[in-house]
Image: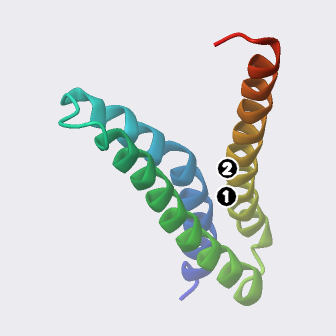
Amino acid sequence: MPAFPDLLAMSAAVFGVATWVIPPVRYLLSFRKGPRDSLSVVGRVIGLFVLAAMLSVAGLVLALLTLVYTDRAFWGWVGLGLSAAFWLALVASMVISDILRWRRQESGQP
């Protein structure tokens, strides 16, 4: 099957892109209906993390299979890089928001 390495390599990159696109779009579309209670937003955020984790794991598996079994390593590295960049950006944004909140509390602003 000569097309299998190409399919495997491109699917790793597709899941890397899907990690960036699908969870935020699903989160934004979930606000079309009004929240039923105060915990619905918490459930939406948890759903965002779970969906992003599932897409990242699928992309990770496909990227590792690409790197191990095919000679098309570029797309495997792209898939790994996209998933890693998503999680690093998420962690960085949480750290920055905590720092900004701490500075506001220190200065006495609400």
As measured in the structure, the alpha-carbon distance from the residue carrying label 2 to the one carrying label 1 is: 5 Å
Q: Position of residue 17 (x, y in %)?
A: 58, 50
User: For numbered disc 2, what is the local secondary structure?
Assistant: helix
Say which of 79 and 57 sits in front: 57
Q: Quadrant of the C terminus?
A: top right
- The label number, if any, that marks residue 36 in the structure image: none
Say which of 83 and 4 sits in front: 83
Left or right of residue 80, residue 24 in this image: left
Quadrant in which residue 13 is drawn: bottom right
Quadrant in which residue 11 is drawn: bottom right
Callout count: 2
Is 85 situated above or below 37?
below
As shown in the figure, which amino acid type bears the numbered disc 2?
A: Phe
Q: Position of residue 92 (x, y in %)?
A: 77, 42
Say which of 73 and 36 sits in front: 36
Residue lying at 81% horizontally and 22% vertically, measured from the top left: 103
Q: Label 1, on which residue? A: 83
As shown in the figure, which amino acid type bears the numbered disc 1?
A: Ser
Q: Label 2 neighbourhood size at 10 Å, few (<14), some (14-19), many (20+)? A: some
User: For numbered disc 1, what is the local secondary structure?
Assistant: helix
Residue lying at 35% horizontally and 50% vertically, measured from the top left: 43
Say which of 57 and 37 sits in front: 37
Q: Label 2, on which residue? A: 86
Is 109 situated above or below 105?
above
Is 100 situated above or below 77?
above
Q: Position of residue 97 (x, y in %)?
A: 71, 31
Question: Cβ–Cβ below 8 Å for labels 2 and 1?
Answer: yes
Left or right of residue 35, residue 107 in this image: right
The colour mode here is rainbow
Residue lying at 74% horizontally and 21% vertically, measured from the top left: 105
Q: Label 1 neighbourhood size at 10 Å, few (<14), some (14-19), many (20+)? A: many
